[in-house]
Image (cartoon, rainbow, N blue to C red):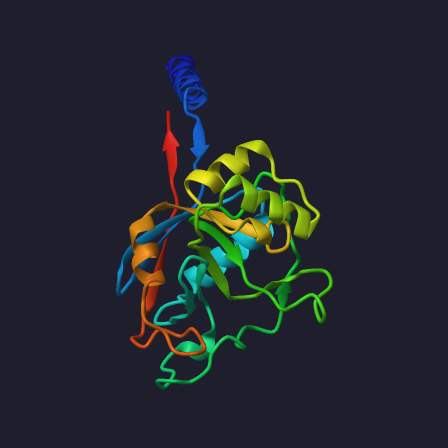
Amino acid sequence: MKNLLCLVIIFSLFSCTSTRKNITIVNQPIQVEITTDSGIIVVQLFDETPLHRDNFVKLVEENFYDSLLFHRVINHFMIQGGDPNSKNAPAGKMLGDGGLSYTVPAEFDTSLYHKKGALAAAREGDNVNPTKASSSTQFYIVHGKPFSDKELDQVEESFKTKIPTAHREVYRTVGGTPHLDMKYTVFGEVISGLEVIDKIASARTDRNNRPHQNIKMKMTIVKKATRK
């Protein structure tokens, strides 16, 4: 009887081990749903920029961004948010100086660029921030515009850079802001809701580029892991 019991236990352990070997956990890129007064945007975060990814995830999980505004909107350029001072800010108040007490080191990657829908970190200017470290909280989503070959050549000449051929094609057809490449960290991209970006970017604004009508945000993390 004891021998039979031992055999049953051994067989059970072997079966569990075999089953486990057939299970693979596949981690999918983290996605964030941004609900706004103008619709829903879904962004996917890049693993190539782990410091920015993890900082953004932490803030979203802490509900930091909920009820903040897209406080700076420039059509054919970008929409910006993440200033904690924008929460319950009175109409007409100039925004854009808020944030937490730290910065995030720049994470430049030549494969990540400012095409339409790119998610990037805002930062202070080079004169006070030569390392191009990112704001702890403020971000922007590129709206941009299509560029002709001549305009892209001018960007290369003015900024002494070379735009890869594949990126040039996207800038010609989809659009973006190529002059920001390798100057601000791109850490994600819109995978759903580009039409919402268009709508927000076209909002009427004051002289400080703040929309006359508040555009609030609320964020939720979407983490995916599949078993197969």
Residue 43: % across, % down: 40, 49
Q: Residue furthest front?
A: 150
Residue 157 lies, with reference to residue 200, above or below; the image says above
> Which residue is drawn at the image coordinates 39% and 45% (left, top)?
223
Q: Nearer the viewer, residue 166 or 193?
A: 166
> Which residue is drawn at the image coordinates 32% and 71% (left, top)?
204
Q: Nearer the viewer, residue 13 or 194?
A: 194
**Picture quarter containing residue 150?**
top right
Residue 50: % across, % down: 58, 48
> Which residue is drawn at the image coordinates 47% and 40% (left, top)?
172
Residue 126 lies, with reference to residue 148, above or below; the image says below
> Which residue is drawn at the image coordinates 38% and 13% (left, top)?
4
Residue 227 lies, with reference to residue 66, above or below; the image says above
Q: Is residue 174 left or right of residue 54?
A: left
The quarter of the rendered structure image containing the C terminus is: top left
Q: Is residue 203 left or right of residue 168?
A: left
Residue 17 lies, with reference to residue 186, above or below; the image says above
**Picture quarter containing residue 12?**
top left
Marker count (numbered): 0
Residue 148: % across, % down: 49, 42
The quarter of the rendered structure image containing the N terminus is: top left
Residue 159: % across, % down: 67, 51
